[in-house]
Image (tube, helix red, strand yellow):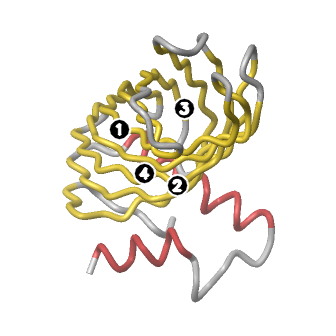
Amino acid sequence: MKYVYFLIAVLTVSNPPANAQEAYAFARKAYAFVENAPGTFVSFNIGFKFGYVVANNKGVIGGIEASLNYRKNLIGVGILISYEQFSGKISSQSGRVFHHYAIQGFWRSLGISFGPMKVALPINNELYYSATLFYGALIFPYYRFTFGQSVSNSHEIGMFAKLPIPIVINRPIVIDD
């Protein structure tokens, strides 16, 4: 039953916040749950990202991302996969589609991920690597550094919005004060 209560609290479908004060109170509780609660939490997280690549290869990047995370007290690890579309120019072509795979680790709400990015369209053998630094829960900013053999280094800033879907919860859940 605790899974149902958690999902209702996150989605707030049946009882959305009536005003900004209620929305803030809910956001504060959700953040406290992710940030401070002791115990074990395993979740499948799905969401989207939107960012801008600065420096040499300027352009907008966006996509969907899914991750599986395991958290024990304040420390966690996870794996992720994303599908991303880049509007800028890399090498001699623009409009690239990437598949990104990574491992991630985090402490409280501060995390880092590292992994390869494979160019999916157009089909070729280009492979890049990226490291992403992120902070927050539900909606959070990120910075990503990407490097590879056939492209100059790029810097990306943006936002993630991800919904955690609990698989295992072994921690206290407080929905009401």
- Residue under label 3, please give it: 135
Looking at this view, is 123 or 138 the one in front? 123
Secondary structure at numbered mark 1: strand
Mark found first going from the N terminus, 3 or 4: 4
* Mark 1, other Cα within 10 Å: few <14 / some 14–19 / many ≥20: many
x and y, in percent, of residue 50 in the image? 67, 45
Cα distance between the residues tagged 4 and 2? 24 Å
Cα distance between the residues tagged 1 and 2? 12 Å
Depicted 112 relative to depicted 55: above or below: below
Mark found first going from the N terminus, 3 or 1: 1
Q: Is residue 102 left or right of residue 20?
A: left
Cα distance between the residues tagged 3 and 1? 19 Å
x and y, in percent, of residue 176 in the image? 49, 69
Residue 64's label in the rendered image is 2
- Mark 3 or mark 2, whichever is nearer to me: 2
- Residue under label 4, please give it: 33
- Mark 3 or mark 4, whichever is nearer to me: 3
Secondary structure at numbered mark 4: helix
Cα distance between the residues tagged 3 and 4? 15 Å
Residue at the extreme bottom of the image, as rendered: 14
Mark found first going from the N terminus, 1 or 2: 2
Q: Is residue 23 left or right of residue 176?
A: right
Tell whether label 2 touches label 4 (CB within 8 Å): no
* Mark 3, other Cα within 10 Å: few <14 / some 14–19 / many ≥20: some
- Residue under label 1, please give it: 101
| Total number of numbered discs in the rendering | 4
Tell whether label 2 touches label 1 (CB within 8 Å): no
Depicted 29 relative to depicted 140: above or below: below
Residue drawn at (42%, 73%) of the image? 7
Q: Is residue 85 left or right of residue 174?
A: right
